[in-house]
Image (cartoon, rainbow, N blue to C red):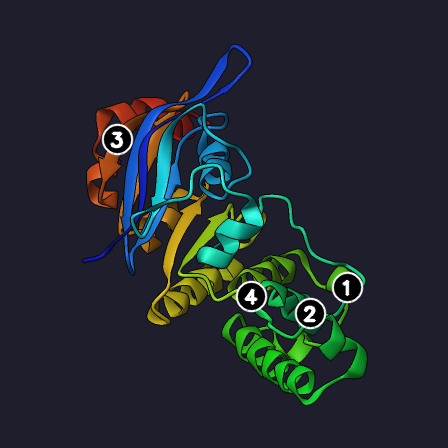
Amino acid sequence: MERLLRVEKVTQRFGGLTALDQVQMHVDRGEIIGVIGPNGSGKSTMFNVITGMYKPAEGKILFKEEEITGLAPHVIAQKGLARTFQNIRLFEKMTAMDNVIIGMHSRTKAGLADAIFHTPRKRKEERESEEKARELLKLVNLYDVRYELASSLSYGYQRKLEIARALAVSPEILLLDEPAAGMNEQETAELLQIIQKIKKLNKTVILIDHDMKFVMNICERLYVLNYGVLIAEGTPEEISKNQDVIDAYLGEEDEE
C-alpha cells in the first residue's frame, strides 16, 4: 500500500492557544479516513494545515514523500489535494456546470493569447472541460440541474456541487469538511454512495463530520482529536470501544 500523506508531529498555535499538539497521522492510497472529535478539537485546523491555509508552528506535511508544509493552497491543489469547506463556497450566480468548469482552471494549459483569439487549442480545452464537468455532475447526481444557478439549488445539492467542483482539479486526495452537515437521512445515504463511487475512481478521501453513523459506515480508519491532541486511531469498531473516545466525544453525544 502506497503511503500518500504523512502528518509528522504537527503543532499549530493561535496566540496562547495550542490548536494542534504534536499530531501524527498517515493516509494510504485508496483509503477513506475520518478525523473526528468534539467542537474545537482541532479538526478544521488540521485540514487547514494540510491544504496550506495555515503554516504549522512545528512539524511537517509530506505528500507522496515530498514536503508540502506551508506551500500556498493553489500549489498544494495543483499537486493533487483538493478540499471542500464547512461553509459552502460556490459561485452563486454561475450555473452548476460553470462552477465545475471553473474548478478545472488550475489544470488548463491554454494561455491568454489562446483565449483572446479562441484558438483550436482553446476550443479543444473547452470541449474537454465541458465533457468532464458533465461526467462529474453525473457522478454526484446533479446532471439534471446542470444549467441551474448554484444559488437556486437546495442546500444538499450545493454540498454535492462543491464535491464535484473539488474533483474538477483531478485530485489524488479529496478532503471533505463536514460533507453531511445539514443533510437529511436520505441525502446522507446518497452522499455515502457518492463517496464510495469516488473511491472507485482511485481517489483517496479524508473527511471530517459530526454524524457518527455516517462516519462509522463510510470510513475504514479514524483519527480522534480532543483539545488538539490525538487521543486515538483505529478502525470504527476499535474507536467505538475506546474509553478515551467515549469520554471525550461519543459519551458527550449520548448525554445530549
Q: Secondary structure at mark 3?
A: strand
Identified at 60% across, 59% down, the residue is 162
Of circles 2 and 1, the one toward us is 2
Q: Secondary structure at mark 4?
A: helix
Q: Earlier in the sequence, mark 4 or mark 3?
A: 4
Number of labels in the image equals: 4
* Residue behind mark 1: 152
Identified at 63% across, 87% down, the residue is 124
Residue 122 in sight = yes
Q: Amino acid at mark 2?
A: Ala
Distance of mark 1 from mark 3, alpha carbons?
41 Å
| Front residue (pair 252, 44) | 44
Q: Secondary structure at mark 1?
A: helix
* Residue behind mark 2: 96
Distance of mark 2 from mark 4, alpha carbons?
9 Å
Of circles 1 and 3, the one toward us is 3
Q: Earlier in the sequence, mark 1 or mark 3?
A: 1
Distance of mark 2 from mark 1, alpha carbons?
10 Å
Distance of mark 3 from mark 2, alpha carbons?
39 Å
Q: Which mark is residue 232?
A: 3
Q: Which mark is residue 164?
A: 4
Q: Earlier in the sequence, mark 3 or mark 2?
A: 2
Q: Amino acid at mark 3?
A: Ala
Q: Amino acid at mark 4?
A: Ala
User: Where 239 sits versus 134, above or below?
Assistant: above
Distance of mark 4 from mark 1, alpha carbons?
17 Å
Distance of mark 4 from mark 3, alpha carbons?
31 Å
Q: Amino acid at mark 1?
A: Ser
